[in-house]
Amino acid sequence: MFEGLSERLSASLKTMAGKSRLTEDNIKDTLREVRMALLEADVALPVVKQFTDAVKQRAVGAEVAQSLSPGQAFLKIVQSELQETMGSANETLNLASQPPVVIMVAGLQGAGKTTSVAKLARYLIEREKKKVSVVSADVYRPAAIKQLETLAGEVGARFEPSSGDERPIDIVNRALEQARLNFSDVLLVDTAGRLAIDQGMMDEIRELHAAINPLETLFVVDAMTGQDAANTAKAFGDTLPLTGVILTKVDADTRGGAALSVRAITGKPIKFLGVGEKTEALDPFHPDRLASRILGMGDMLSLIEDAERTVDKKKAQKLAKKVQKGGRFDLEDFRDQLQQMRNMGGITNMLDKLPGMGNMAQMAQQNIDLKQFARMEAMIDSMTFKERRNPDVISGSRKRRITLGSGTQVQDLNRLLKQHKQMQKMMKKMKGGGMQKMMRGLGGMMPPGGGMPPGGFPGGR
């Protein structure tokens, strides 16, 4: 995420880190590099100017002069101003109202609006423990209604049917009444998108807004459109009283211009980031954490929250006790670790959030065969209970049976067995307190010190 910007900024700021004294000249040179990095990341020019002016004003002031480490103080100023540019703190959804709380979701066609509604429903159900109803008022695209129905079933939300021959305003009024009758806490309304902002679209959505008076009106915008995303959000916000923005396709955006421009241009907070195609790929937006990631400092808080939410604590504790007592780390344990890592978003997601590992995540994305994890699980699933517990019994004939059953090659299985052996050796060294510390950290996914998995990445090409 935002690899290009992160790399350029980190390189520019590295020269300042060791400075014992800051002068107008060295600040000016570094800020020129920072300005170029931001412009290349497609950050809007007024935002770049405002940001660099604010950094310069603070850097030449008493704040840095009185510091014992001026270079480090300068880095802190850059981080602080990045955070301020994106919004000083996380702004949550306002759910403090008589249920059902109505949340309207708007945006241009192709921005990921319908998928974002489903992701938001899942977020509210799983993290906020709310009963959610969803409805589509997009009468121009029957496929959008069908898509929302399918996604609602996947995430466990109640779907209110609608059809192309109804008026959008009648759909939302009926949906609101049905949400009340079904005791829903939240009603999510998916509205029609267009390929561009037009007056007809604005008139219709304004009428819808007036009819249901939503507590939250969220605008969905594609991060990959850069500063155009911020300009589109502003044009929309001039017509509708937006309460926040959902920035989608952030995982595919290497530049970061939208994230840095939206708040400054629209005055509206980014509330969520869409970080993948799956319905669980929606993260609350924390400006402080993203500023740290952009500067290569990682995001340990989000990583810990991922672990808290997704790691099976009973399995992690069971494995910790087993290894502490000198128990054998078998292939069933290995499969559990693969599944835990997948639940946390995979190796690249984890590396991206570890301090100083952003570049490693980018390398991993390019060099790892990500399907290898699924193949490894398939091979373990194809084994007998005895083989999983004691891999040493896996002979040539057993290897042929396992690879035929899992649709893999013998060399895939040999690689799996080798990696398991390496992890088994590491586990033997983890008797006593060391194992508990590791399990508490990341549920056993990463070796001590946050380095590479044993034997490097599985399936490296």
Image (cartoon, rainbow, N blue to C red):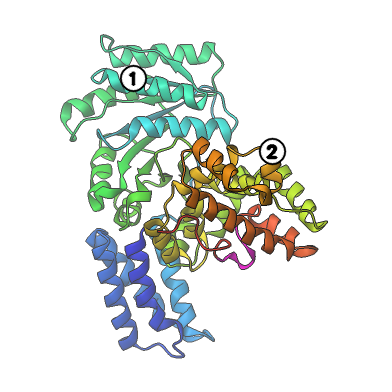
Q: Which residue is drawn at 55% across and 40% down?
A: 402
Asked if the magenta segment contains residue 447, the reply would be yes
**In the displayed structure image, the side of residue 59 where residue 109 appears, left or right:** left
User: Percent position (x, y) of residue 156?
Assistant: 52, 24
Evaluate if marks 1 and 2 touch, with contact meaning CB atoms under 8 Å apart: no
Which portion, as a residue range, is magenta?
A: 446-451
User: Magenta segment: does it hold 195?
Assistant: no
Q: Residue 145 carries which label?
A: 1
The amino acid type, in three-letter code, at marker 1 is: Ile
Q: What amino acid is found at the position of numbered circle 2 in the picture?
A: Phe
Residue annotated with mark 2? 385
The residue closer to the viewer here, 123 or 336, is 336
Decide which of 448, 355 is in the foreground and name it: 448
Comparing 337 with 269, the one in front is 337
Q: Please state, as top left, top right, bottom left or bottom right, where the N terminus lies in the image.
A: bottom left
Comes first in the chain, label 1 or label 2: 1
- Density class for disc 2 (Cα within 10 Å; few <14, some 14-19, many ≥20) is few
The structure residue drawn at horizontal position 56% and vertical position 23%, both measured from the top left corner, is: 131
